[in-house]
Amino acid sequence: MIVTVGESLVDIIGGKAFPGGSPLNVAAASSRLDSSAAYVGRISSDSYGKQILDMLIDDIVFFEPRLCNAAERTSSAMAVANEKGDVSYTFDFDGTASVNVTASQIRSGFESIADLQFLFAGSVSLALEPCGTSIEEVVLGLDEDVVVMLDPNVRTSVSSDMSSLRARIERLAVRASVVRFSSDDIAALYPGFSDEQTAGRMSELGVKNTIITRGSKGSSWYADGRVFFEPAIAVKPVDTVGCGDTFDGAVLHCLERIGFCRRDELSDENIRRILRFATVAATENCLKAGCNPPHLCDSEGLEKIDSLWN
């Protein structure tokens, strides 16, 4: 099962609220692609929290009832898209439910998950407290066979201490099998670094698979000295909300489909196929408002690639 941990929130776009938050979106994207997925995080009892629960139920994403109905309110992000579809955010996390989570509460969420094979962590949760410390403690204490995917998903408006955030991400990267950076993440965490230098730094930390996405400029996968490039698909996006999250969910779905284990080395063919699948999924997401990942059964392009795993 694919499990995600971290914040849930609502994206406010044009006055309308869409359930979101990177970990929540990744779980939904994985589930819509027919993977078994679970989300572990505290969810508010307010109206936005109920909207988030409805989304999890509709998308068949498992969750821990003991972490629901929190007294604190739901986190929110005011999203504004420019004419190219790129989105900027203004966040409100103060005193909210998802931020105020302890390591013991996260572990309690894991107790009801029978088969935790893949764990996704990252996003703004790592820059906030107490959730950042709680997530780090849990990830570093996982069983050896759990595959960890890390996505920093840095938001500079939230991350006031970039040096401390970078140190935390590097501690977590030591435990990760896959790390994905956007070009914005690199600019924030490693100013002046090239993609190759960033991948090299991850390799120094023991990361075997580093993915770098660059929006319309495509994506690359660095694996033990091998480099694979996948061009972007030219479309006119409605917005880019959740595109990276959908990409992450698609990567995790593929890793689950091939039975990837922590110490496995991915073949050239598998890496190329995963990059293509994730690119198609992210492209389909950006053709709709908000984070709205595609369902496998509704996408001929994704079904065709997915069938190759059999």
Image: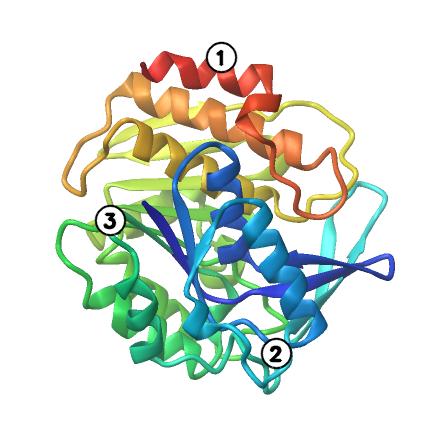
* Disc 1 to disc 2, C-alpha distance: 40 Å
* Disc 3 to disc 1, C-alpha distance: 28 Å
Give the side of residue 165 with respect to residue 309, left or right: right
User: Element under label 3?
Assistant: loop
- Tell me if label 1 and label 2 are in contact, CB under 8 Å: no
Is residue 214 visible to us here?
yes
Neighbourhood count class around disc 3 (C-alpha, 10 Å): few under 14, some 14–19, many 20 upward: few
Q: Residue at x 61, y 76 (%)?
A: 45
Q: Which amino acid does the dot numbered 1 rest on?
A: Lys
Up the image or down, 93 lies above or below 62; here it is below
Q: Residue at x 55, y 44 (%)?
A: 59
Q: Which amino acid does the dot numbered 2 rest on?
A: Phe
Q: Position of residue 177 (x, y in %)?
A: 25, 46
Q: Which residue is mark 3?
A: 115
* Disc 3 to disc 2, C-alpha distance: 31 Å
Up the image or down, 26 lies above or below 270; here it is below
Is residue 126 visible to us here?
no
Comparing labels 3 and 1, the label whose residue is closer to the camera: 3
**Is tag 3's residue or tag 2's residue first in the polypeptide sequence?**
2
Q: Residue at x 55, y 53 (%)?
A: 56
User: Element under label 2?
Assistant: loop
Neighbourhood count class around disc 1 (C-alpha, 10 Å): few under 14, some 14–19, many 20 upward: few
Comparing labels 3 and 2, the label whose residue is closer to the camera: 3
Comparing labels 1 and 2, the label whose residue is closer to the camera: 1
Q: Which residue is mark 2?
A: 93
Q: Quadrant of residue 50?
A: bottom right
Up the image or down, 23 lies above or below 36; here it is below
Up the image or down, 153 lies above or below 246; here it is below
The quadrant of the rendering that contains the N terminus is top left
Q: Which residue is mark 1?
A: 304
The quadrant of the rendering that contains the C terminus is top left
